[in-house]
Amino acid sequence: MLNNIGLPGLLLIAVVVLVLFGRGKISSMMGEVGKGITSFKKGMNEGAKELEDQPGDDAKDVTPEAETDKTKA
């Protein structure tokens, strides 16, 4: 359905959105989208840094005893 919109269709949609919402409202909405993306990236970077800072000693073997007995035999 969306495969054959083309450039004229996209331009028409852009003009309709501009007429309905106005230039000021669209620019403020795009600013909020930009802030959201920035916040998301910041959260992802902080999460990755937190995972890197954690020591690896916290890992423990959670394999059920029945399976560990099979592998030792």
Image (tube, rainbow, N blue to C red):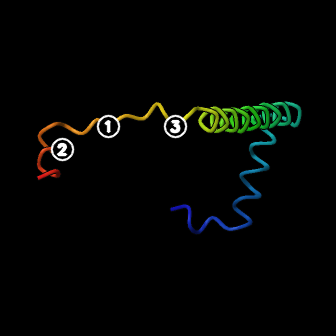
* Position in image of residue 15 (x %, y %): 79, 49
* Position in image of residue 70 (x %, y %): 11, 49
Residue depicted at 69% across the width and 33% down the height = 46
- Which numbered circle lies on residue 68? 2
Residue depicted at 73% across the width and 66% down the height = 7
Residue 29, by quadrant, is: top right
Residue depicted at 79% across the width and 32% down the height = 35
Secondary structure state at the residue bearing disc 2: helix
Instruction: Give the residue number, with chain letter if any, for mark 3.
Output: 56
User: Which is more toward the observer, 22 or 56?
Assistant: 56
Mark 2 neighbour class, 10 Å CA radius: few under 14, some 14 to 19, many 20 or more: few
User: Which is more toward the observer, 71 or 21?
Assistant: 71
Labelled pair 2, 1 in contact (Cβ < 8 Å): yes
Please determine whether, in this image, residue 14 is positioned above or below residue 28: below
The amino acid pointed to by label 3 is Gly
Labelled pair 3, 1 in contact (Cβ < 8 Å): no
Query: Which of disc 3 and disc 2 is earlier in sequence?
Result: 3
Instruction: Give the residue number, with chain letter if any, for mark 1.
Output: 61
Labelled pair 2, 3 in contact (Cβ < 8 Å): no
Q: Alpha-carbon distance for marks 2 and 1?
A: 10 Å
The amino acid pointed to by label 1 is Asp
The amino acid pointed to by label 2 is Thr
Q: Alpha-carbon distance for marks 3 and 1?
A: 13 Å
* Position in image of residue 19 (x %, y %): 81, 40
Residue 44, by quadrant, is: top right
User: Which is more toward the observer, 68 or 43?
Assistant: 68
Residue depicted at 11% across the width and 40% down the height = 66
